[in-house]
C-alpha cells in the first residue's frame, strides 16, 4: 500500500485532444495527488498570491475508509505545502474554497452521513498555513450540501447549495449568510414541489446575490433557475431559462462588469451551455456547444477573462474515455479555441470541476482522473500558461465563412437565413424567444461546405424579437430577428 501523499504523478507529456490552435495557452504542468486503491476528487480551487493555489477536495485517509473533506495548498510548481483533513470524525466533502480579504482560507461543503441527520452543510476557516480557526455546521434532518461559498463585503460569507426538508428528500435552493465568525445571519430555502438545486452563488455590485442552478418545480421542468436576492435574502426577481426541451442546468454563475450575468452548465444533459443575461435576468445571448465526443458534456465553471471573454471548464464523456474539456469564448459566446485533456497516468476517466485565474493570466484547473491501475480516482490539478491575447481571434467568427444573415429583417411571415460552413458538418439551427425558450428547431442535419440557405416560417409565432442560433463543431453564431404582423 502507498500512503496517501506518497503517490504523486508528474508528467511533462500532457495528453490533449486539440481542436483549435488559435491563441491556445500551453500547459505548464499537470499532476495527480492521491493514494493507491483509494478515491480522491478535486472540486474548488483558488489561486494564491505567491503563485500557488489552494484546493477543496475529498479523500479517503486510508483505503476503504470514509471520504473526508481534504484541503491542500500547493506552490507554483505544484509541490505540496500542506494538506489537512477537516472534521476527522465524520465523512464529507469540501466543494468550494476561497481566499479571504485578510489572507485566511474558507472552505465549504458537507459533513455527516449519520442518522437522523444524513449530512449537514459545513463551513470552516483556516489560516494560510492550514491551522483551524473555526468550523460550523448548519441544517437539520435530511441532506444539506454547500457547493459554493463567497466572501461578502462585510467579511462574512454567502453559501449556496441544496437542502432537503420536511422529510420529502426533494431539495430546495439552500442559501445561508453568515458573519465573519461563521455564525448564521439568515438561512433561506427557495423552491416548489419538485427538485430545485443551487450550484453557485456570486456577490453582486450592490451587496446582493445571484444564485443559479436547476429547477423541476417551475416552468416546464428541467430548466435553468436564476434567483436575484437582496442582501437580506428576499427575492428581487426569479427567472426560469429554458434553452432546450431537455434537461438544462446552470452549474456556475458570475456577475459581469456590465452588472449582467454569465451562466454555464449543461444543455439537454449533453452539451456545454453558456447564457449571458442583463441585470434583470433577460437573455442577451445563449450558446450550446456541440460535444467533444458522442456522449455527455457539462460545463462546471466559468472564468471572466481579461479581454472580456470567458473560459468554460467541465467534463466530456465519450465511449473510449472521459476527458476534461475547456472552451474559450468571446464576450458574445463565439468559440476562440477548445481542447480536451486527460489526467496523467493510466486513466480512462478525467474531468475538470473548478478553475481560477491568476493576475498574470495563468489559469489553475482542478478535477479528478483514474491515474493509476488500482481502480481508484485521484485529485488532478493542471496549470495553464497565460494566453497571447494579441493573437486571439474567434474561430470562424467575423469572416465570410461564418456570417449568419437574415433577409428581410424585420419580416412579416418568412425570412431567409444565409450562412456558410468551412466544411461539411452537422449543424443545428434553432429559434429562441427573448426569455430564452426554444420555440423551434429549423435544422438538425449535415450540410455541405460553402454557402447555405434556410427559410424560417414565423407564421405560427407572435409578433416580437427572436434569436436564431447556428451551432456546429466550428461555428456558434446568433442573429436577432424581428417578426412583425
Image: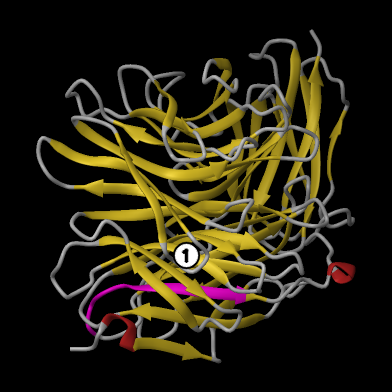
Q: Is residue 170 above or below residue 86?
A: above
Q: Is 448 in front, or is 350?
A: 350
Please state the horizontal and vertical placement of residue 11, each as a whole percent of the image. 50, 90
Where are the magenta residues, as a range?
A: 374-383
Q: Is 437 in front, or is 241?
A: 241
Residue found farthest to the bottom: 12
Residue found farthest to the top: 485
Residue 381 counted in the magenta span: yes
Residue 250 counted in the magenta span: no
Q: Is residue 142 visible?
A: yes
What kind of element bears circle 1? strand
Q: Is residue 248 visible?
A: no
Horizontal side, residue 318 vs residue 138: left or right: right
Q: Which residue is drawn at the image coordinates 88% and 53% (left, top)? A: 398
Q: Specify few, some or many for label 1: CA neighbours under 10 Å numbering under 14, 14-19, or 20 or more.
A: many
Q: Which residue is drawn at the image coordinates 84% and 67% (left, top)? A: 389
Residue found farthest to the left: 115
Q: Is residue 444 above or below residue 211?
A: below
Please state the horizontal and vertical placement of residue 377, each as a whole percent of the image. 30, 73
Amino acid at each position: 500500500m502507498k500512503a496517501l501523499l506518497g503517490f504523486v504523478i508528474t508528467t511533462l507529456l500532457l495528453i490533449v485532444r486539440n481542436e483549435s490552435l488559435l491563441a491556445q495557452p500551453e500547459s505548464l504542468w499537470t499532476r495527480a495527488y492521491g493514494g493507491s486503491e483509494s478515491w480522491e476528487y478535486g472540486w474548488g480551487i483558488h489561486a494564491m498570491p505567491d503563485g500557488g493555489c489552494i484546493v477543496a477536495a475529498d479523500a479517503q485517509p486510508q483505503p476503504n475508509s470514509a471520504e473526508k473533506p481534504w484541503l491542500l495548498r500547493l506552490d507554483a510548481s505544484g509541490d505540496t505545502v500542506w494538506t489537512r483533513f477537516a472534521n476527522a470524525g465524520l465523512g464529507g466533502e469540501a466543494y468550494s474554497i476561497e481566499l479571504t480579504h485578510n489572507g485566511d482560507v474558507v472552505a465549504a461543503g458537507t459533513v455527516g452521513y449519520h442518522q437522523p441527520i444524513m449530512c449537514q452543510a459545513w463551513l470552516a476557516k483556516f489560516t494560510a498555513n492550514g491551522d483551524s480557526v473555526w468550523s460550523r455546521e448548519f441544517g437539520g434532518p435530511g441532506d444539506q450540501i454547500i457547493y459554493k461559498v463567497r466572501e461578502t463585503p462585510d467579511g462574512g460569507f454567502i453559501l449556496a447549495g441544496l437542502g432537503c426538508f420536511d422529510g420529502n428528500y426533494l431539495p430546495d435552493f439552500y442559501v445561508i449568510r453568515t458573519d465573519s465568525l461563521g455564525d448564521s445571519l439568515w438561512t433561506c430555502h427557495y423552491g416548489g414541489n419538485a427538485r430545485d438545486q443551487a450550484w453557485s452563488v456570486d456577490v453582486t455590485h450592490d451587496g446582493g446575490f445571484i444564485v443559479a442552478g436547476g429547477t423541476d418545480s417551475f416552468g416546464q421542468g428541467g430548466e435553468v433557475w436564476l434567483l436575484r436576492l437582496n442582501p437580506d435574502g428576499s427575492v428581487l426577481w426569479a427567472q426560469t431559462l429554458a434553452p432546450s426541451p431537455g434537461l438544462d442546468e446552470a452549474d456556475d454563475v458570475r456577475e459581469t462588469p456590465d452588472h449582467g450575468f454569465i451562466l454555464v452548465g449543461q444543455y439537454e444533459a449533453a452539451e456545454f451551455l453558456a447564457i449571458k443575461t442583463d441585470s434583470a435576468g433577460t437573455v442577451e445571448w445563449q450558446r450550446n456547444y456541440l460535444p467533444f465526443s458522442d456522449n455527455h458534456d457539462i460545463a462546471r465553471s466559468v472564468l471572466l477573462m481579461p479581454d472580456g471573454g470567458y473560459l468554460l471548464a467541465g467534463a466530456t464523456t465519450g465511449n473510449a474515455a472521459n476527458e476534461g474539456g475547456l472552451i474559450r469564448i468571446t464576450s458574445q459566446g463565439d468559440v476562440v479555441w477548445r481542447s480536451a485533456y486527460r489526467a496523467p497516468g493510466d486513466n480512462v476517466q478525467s474531468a475538470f470541476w473548478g478553475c481560477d485565474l491568476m493576475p498574470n493570466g495563468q489559469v489553475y484547473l482542478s478535477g479528478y482522473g483514474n491515474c493509476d491501475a488500482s481502480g481508484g480516482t485521484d485529485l488532478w490539478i493542471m496549470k495553464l500558461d497565460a494566453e497571447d491575447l494579441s493573437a486571439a481571434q474567434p474561430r470562424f467568427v467575423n469572416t465570410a465563412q461564418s456570417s449568419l444573415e437574415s433577409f428581410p429583417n424585420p419580416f412579416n411571415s418568412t425570412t431567409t437565413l444565409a450562412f456558410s460552413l468551412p466544411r461539411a458538418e452537422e449543424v443545428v439551427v434553432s429559434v429562441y424567444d427573448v426569455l430564452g425558450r426554444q420555440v423551434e428547431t429549423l435544422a438538425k442535419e449535415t450540410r455541405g461546405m460553402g454557402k447555405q440557405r434556410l427559410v424560417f416560417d414565423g407564421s405560427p409565432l407572435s409578433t416580437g424579437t427572436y434569436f436564431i442560433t447556428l451551432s456546429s463543431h466550428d461555428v456558434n453564431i446568433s442573429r436577432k430577428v424581428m417578426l412583425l404582423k
